[in-house]
Each structure stands twice: as C-alpha cells, then as structure tokens.
Amino acid sequence: MMHTTDNPGKYDDACTQARLATGALGTVLLVLGGRKGHGFSVQAPPEVLSALPGMLETVAAEIRRDLQAMKS
C-alpha cells in the first residue's frame, strides 16, 4: 500500500509520474517556484516513509555544507 503525507500535495500527479517512470519504491518531489507555487509530494510504503525524516536531515546537512563551501 502506498502512503502519502496527510493530504495530497500540490504536485502529487508529478510525484506519481516520477515514481512510475523510475520504477522507484517511493518518491519525494520538492518543487520550488513551480506553476502551483512551492510544494512537495511524498509517496512511499511505510517502511520507506519511516526512514524519510533521517534521509531529509542528511540532505539538509549536505545542502548546508555546500552553501558554506560556496561562501568560502
């Protein structure tokens, strides 16, 4: 069974397309400045969804490191 965040995201259709096109177990789609504005959609089974917060924290830390390196 596929789980999403509490409500469908603004870009749920695109998230579904990405998941199906890539054959992925789950997808997270983050859109910045899209036609519908900023938004995100998540589609993943429970075992992947439960790991998502840690994965996103890792991504955030990497972005912070990259931004800091760009300032140097």
Image (cartoon, rainbow, N blue to C red):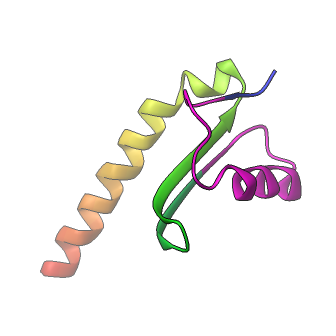
Q: Give the residue furthest to the left.
A: 72
Out of 15 and 37, give the one closest to the viewer: 37
Q: Which residues are magenta?
A: 4-28
Residue found 14% across the figure and 79% down from its top? 71
Residue found 44% across the figure and 31% down from its top? 53
**Residue 48 in the image: above or below residue 26:** above
Instruction: Indicate whether residue 9 is drawn in magenta.
Output: yes
Out of 29 and 13, give the one closest to the viewer: 13
Instruction: Indicate whether residue 37 is drawn in magenta.
Output: no
Left or right: where 72 falls relative to 40: left
Residue 27 x %, y %: 68, 46
Left or right: where 66 falls relative to 54: left
Left or right: where 46 falls relative to 19: left
Residue 65 x %, y %: 25, 61
The answer to which image quadrant residue 62 occupies is: bottom left
The answer to which image quadrant residue 9 occupies is: top right
**Residue 17 in the image: above or below residue 51:** below
Residue found 68% across the figure and 37% down from its top? 43
Left or right: where 24 falls relative to 5: right
Residue found 77% across the figure and 57% down from its top? 18
- Location of the C terminus by quadrant is bottom left
The mark tally for this picture is 0
- Location of the N terminus by quadrant is top right
Residue 50 x %, y %: 55, 21
Residue 63 x %, y %: 33, 61
Q: Give the residue furthest to the front.
A: 36
Out of 66 and 30, give the one closest to the viewer: 30
